[in-house]
Amino acid sequence: MLSQSSFYKYNSDGVSFLSKGSVDWRTIYFPLCGVASDGIKSSITPFLCGDIKIDKNFYLTKPVSTEDLRYPVRNFFISVKGKGVVSLVGGKLSVEAGQIWHKVKGVYKQQGIEIEVLNFVPVSEENLELMQVTVRNISQGILTITPTSVIPVFGRALANKHDHEHVTSLLHRTKQLKEGVFVQPTMSFNEEGHKKNALSCYVFGIDGRESLPVGSFPTIDSFYGSSGTALEPEAITNEVMPKNLIDEKINGKEAVGALRFATIDLVPQEERVYVITIGVAQGENEAREDFQKFNSCKKVKKAYEENKKYWMHKTEATAFQTGNDDFNSWMRWVTLQPVLRRIYGCSFLPDHDYGKGGKGWRDIWQDLLSLILIEPDQVREDLINNFAGVRIDGSNATIIGSAPGEFIADRNAIARVWMDHGVWPFMTLLLYVNQTGDYNILFEQNTYFRDVQMSRTFQKDEVWTPEYGNKLKDVKGNTYKGTLIEHVLLQNLVQFFNVGEHNITRLESADWNDGLDMGFDRGESVTFMSAYAGNLEAMAELLIRCKEVLDIQEIVLSKEIVVLLDSLIEEGVDYSSVQAKKTFLFETYFSSVEPEVSGEQVKINIDDVVKDLRKKKDWIFQHIRTQEWITVDKNGFRDSWFNGYYDNEAVRVEGDIDGIVRMTLTGQVFPMMSGVVKDDDVKVVDAAVRRYLQDRKLGGIRLNSNFEKEPYLELGRAFGFAYGTKENGAFFSHMIVMYAYALYSRGLAREGYEVLQSIYNMCIDTQRSKIYPGIPEYFDSEGKGMYHYLTGSASWLVLTQLTQVFGVRGCGGDLVLAPMLVKEEFNKKGLAAVSCPFAGKQLMVIYENSSKKDFGSYRIEEVFCNKNVISFERYAQNGIKIIRKLVEDVEGDVELNVILS
């Protein structure tokens, strides 16, 4: 295995890195962005390829996907008198990058030139990318150079990359200003309704002595010419002088921001700096105002330092210190990734998965998991707003709008419902309550989402129109609101009754594995029925704590939702009867809430709610344990695990099927995490996972074994993918991390550590992974990291490292320390540490294990808070609990030295 050191090496700050190997891979990329999700979002490669955009409706440069990275976007040409032309697509290159900036250095010995290009987006929230180019004479003589920067300008929507590409270029109104090129498209072109375009884009420049360009080439025609290319534009090869173009030659043309700077002489070792601002603005005045903020080297240097300081502070707030320095550095990049996903969504980097930008339902909850740990101050309002996407049938809107609490039915206007979507909101809400002790959030109110879709897509409201609005109303026409606890109860209770032929929750349009999308009619998911059962128990425990903390005996619920607590009714539903459950859900509940609710709310005793939730949980546990436990005898081994699915023919998916062992990782993760797997069987399931899903060569754990059924049309599109890619047997980081979390949650620290190490090892095997530091969405069968940066696996990895491995987590707002560190994770002095925000303080927890004992052989003996001994109570098997007030009352930062023995 080739370690990351042969591809990139961390600098002394332990975060930024130098890479000489990345220039060998044209499709490797790096993100550049500001702090806001509605601001500039860029991607960049060692050859300055990539794109720059605001959102799917406005790309400053032409949209790119991975293969487009082979073609240049940003460039800087230097004509050296008597020695030809150099640009950043040639020469001997190296890359240096940090959080979040990117620097390329090129050496051109034949011409005697060295070029260094720094790119970053300011954190002061102007919508621009800064590009600072430093040109240095490394020869022994005087060089006469003529510099020209070039940024092709697209200035329209993602869709226009193919749809109406030429027609939309006719909308361009381009100006040659003294600062550079300014492009104002007249409208946003959309055949469903054209709109006046408020956004403009510009490419302005200045040199280090604050001299503006001597001219510009504002169109593709004027710069590249009739026979030129991106690498050899005629304006460069033919030494064309820039001139101001007449309207007929500049308007309605494909635009480019090509800026010509003055010809100068450079003596040996002399350098000259050029600053290029590539931005989006609302008009010419704003463009000039933003440019004025960065129109000198001094201003750019200040912005660069502010950029580094901001992002360094962001990731050092939650940072890990183990015995492996490279792992610690790598985790700093993983910690950044959830923040990147908050800004980018899922789609605005070249390996775009969803394609049209934005986020889906699952994404907003998964990302909040780590943001609760990393950016806790920003979470509460987002958490509340997100519940506006829940429908009264327990499903939800599938696309999140740009405004807080804004939801859209579906990106493709196809009615779909994912059966796992009800799981994530409660998991996230529970983490928030435990970290903060904010039980009151459970009783904050929000609306329910309303559109044409009803009864989990089985019905359509033919009279609904957008004018009605997307909020559920009562029979009197008032917008209905319910508490957050009502929302999560609804989501989880509906899925208890929404079952298929085997009395397992219906698969519907898919679960977490979007590739299992062809089982709507008869498919079922044991996997997520287990997760819902775990939620029911956790809700019961949370409600009991609410009674104690808030001194309440009752909660208020919609009159109709109370019906789902059927054990409170004199004649409850027969849980063993599939038909009874379906009839109850569709004919009793759905018919009572669609198209409107009554608006009446009733008080329900908390003890009664808890009793009902636990009755349902107990039934699910027993049902799955009895019906879905399978045993396979193969090659002299006897293995057992849980079947995860039934396909659209109502056939069990997993087991020994015609001599082929079929197994899924998801089918084991959620039964283990929820408690469906009995304590005595956890290692049994893990042994089966290692035997059938762990790759002997690469070490990682696959999402599923090779079903050897292509395509498996009764289950989903995943099995049309080549085995070892995407949802068909790839090394899917998200589920692998969740498997590690499940192992830790069941006390298997060594096994959890090995699983996490398998991912880390695949990441740093850069000969195969071909990625910068961080965790990708998945690895293919060759070990290549795919869909880097924007993956929910980063959130779960931060969550797992902090709350399970280091055991630093909240419990009803109090601080729990329950480390599950194995001996390899301590440094030579026996120390391991983590910093994180908690209770409004910056917390540093240092575990001292002087004897280097392994997990299971140590326990917490003493705790010092800022060098003073503090009291604690024993908690769970290996942990302690410290009351929140003790942390809150400390002045300044809190350092806890925890003695293990």
Image (cartoon, rainbow, N blue to C red):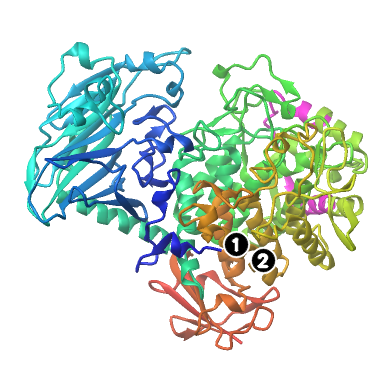
Tally of numbered tags: 2
Residue 333: image quadrant is bottom left
From which residue to which does the magenta span run?
588-617
Depth check: give the residue in front, 719 or 338. Answer: 719
**Is residue 653 part of the magenta span, yes or no?**
no
Residue 458: image quadrant is top right
Tell me residue 884's x, y (percent).
53, 69
* Tag 1 and tag 2, C-beta contact below 8 Å: yes
Depth check: give the residue in front, 128 or 270. Answer: 270
Tell me residue 833's x, y (percent).
50, 74
Q: Residues within 10 Å of mark 2 (few under 14, many from 20)?
A: many
Q: Secondary structure at mark 1?
A: helix
The prevailing secondary structure element of the residues shown in magenta is helix
Kindly identify which numbered label has been placed on residue 752.
Answer: 2
Q: Is residue 11 above or below residue 663?
A: below
Image check: 845 left or right of 736? Answer: left
Identify which amino acid the numbered label 1 is placed on: Thr
Identify which amino acid the numbered label 2 is placed on: Gly
The residue depicted at 16 percent of the width and 55 percent of the height is: 138
Image check: 185 left or right of 67? Answer: left
Tell me, yes or no, if residue 602 can be seen here: no
Q: Residues within 10 Å of mark 1 (few under 14, many from 20)?
A: many
Q: Which is more foreground, mark 1 or mark 2?
A: 2
Q: Is residue 524 above or below residue 182?
A: below
Residue named by callout 1:
800
